[in-house]
Amino acid sequence: MINLVSPLGWTNILLLISALLSLAMAIFVMTRGLKNKINLYFSLLTLSTFAWGLSLFFARTMIDFSQSQFWAYFAYIAATGIGVSLFYFTLNFPYKIKNLNSWQHCLVLAPALIFTTIVYIKNWFIIGMSRDIPNTNYVLEYNKPVYIAYAIYFILIILLALYFLWIKYRRADGVIKTQLGFLSLAIVIGLVVGTYFDLIICYFGNFQHAWLGPVFTLFMNAAVFYLIFFEKKH
């Protein structure tokens, strides 16, 4: 039985709602079929966002320390999934402009595999964790060189995703150009907020606003969802 802190507080409730909405989008996309790569990578993106939001929710609200610690660490695995799936989504949406070579796929996937593998290895990525149960908050202590390497990797992969959209935006016109501009803006807003509150200030031990990342990323996912399933019908 899940043992949660009570009362949860409106920030944690909002965090949970945003996670569940991402899950709902993922399920909807899966019912439309995953042979389409746009659907495949968007479903992975929304599933990763769901896992990220849910892991932060449990990390903040579980009374049991070991369970809270597990989910706090897992948030970085989920966040890595967001970066990788967004990279491949923008590579394919609304059409593919480049086929990656095997070594290029390795450059994207190998660091992701390494970072997600070492998350639970003591002192490799995360050194320790402390709890503030009454305020449903926690603080992680990092192996800073590894954390900086992770941050650089994550930011670079997001910048590459935006680069793909920029190339397509420059070549497009009409409705597609508008769609790509709207999508780029949504990604920038969602990921700038997420990167700042869940990556940058966490480096300095401030986790009070980590719940904002999944909430703003939900807006990004909602914008993509609209473009895929509604806008193109007009």
Image: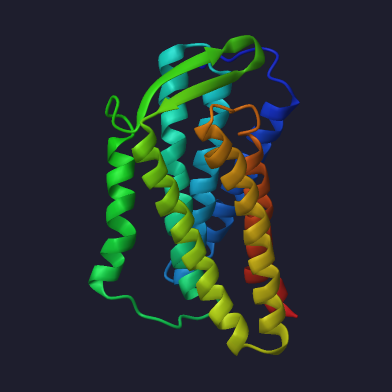
Q: In the displayed structure, does residue 167 sit left or right of residue 96?
A: right
Q: Is residue 96 above or below residue 61?
A: below
Q: Residue at x 62, y 88 (%)?
A: 172
Above or below, comparing residue 226 to residue 12 in the picture: below
Q: x, y percentage for residue 37? A: 44, 70
Q: Is residue 203 visible?
A: yes
Residue 70: percent from the left, percent from the top? 40, 25
* Quadrant of the snapshot with the C terminus: bottom right
The image's colouring method is: rainbow
Residue 146 or residue 36, whichever sits in front: 146
- Return the residue found at the far left: 103
Q: Is residue 168 above or below residue 33?
A: below
| Left or right side of 163 for 149 | left
Point 65% across, 47% down: residue: 193
| Picture quadrant of residue 97 | bottom left
Which residue sits at x=72%, y=88%?
174
Q: What is the x, y in percent for residue 143?
A: 36, 31
Towards the viewer: 71 or 145: 145
* Residue 225 can be seen in this image: no
Q: Residue at x 29, y 31 (%)?
A: 124
Q: How many marks?
A: 0
Residue 127, percent across and down?
36, 24
Out of 190 and 44, give the one closest to the viewer: 190
